[in-house]
Amino acid sequence: MLSPLLGALNLKCNITAYRPVMDAIDLLKRYLDQPIAKEGAFFDEAEKIPLGGVVTRGVAQGSRG
């Protein structure tokens, strides 16, 4: 479901506060054609994963609360 949505949208934003979110969306778009294994998607080790401003500290550390 995410793949067709990201493929159809052309998102742009000049607000610097939203730059981490836009970088995260760009990263997801680059990996749309990658098969996702049962345990989840994996990104190349060289990728800079934009977590700051996108993912809360608890989620980034693996907390479910």
Image (cartoon, grey):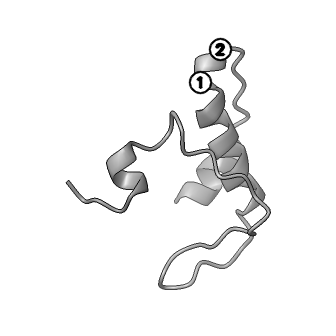
Q: Residue furthest top?
A: 15
When the figure is inspected, residue 15 is found, relative to residue 44, above or below; the finding is above
Q: Position of residue 12 (x, y in %)?
A: 72, 25
Q: Are marks 1 and 2 in contact (CB under 8 Å)?
A: yes
Is 29 left, or right, of 2 in this rendering? Answer: right
What is the quadrant of the C terminus in the image? bottom left
When the figure is inspected, residue 14 is found, relative to residue 5, above or below; the finding is above
Q: What's under tag 2, amino acid-wise?
A: Ile
Image mark for residue 15: 2
Q: Nearer the viewer, residue 5 or 62?
A: 62
The secondary structure type at the circle numbered 1 is helix
Q: How many marks?
A: 2
Quadrant hosting residue 56: top left
Q: Residue at x 79, y 63 (%)?
A: 46
Q: What's under tag 1, amino acid-wise?
A: Tyr
Quadrant hosting residue 21: top right
Is 46 left, or right, of 50 in this rendering? Answer: right
When the figure is inspected, residue 60 is found, relative to residue 11, above or below; the finding is below
Is 39 left, or right, of 65 in this rendering? Answer: right
Q: Which residue is mark 1?
A: 18
Q: Residue at x 63, y 73 (%)?
A: 42
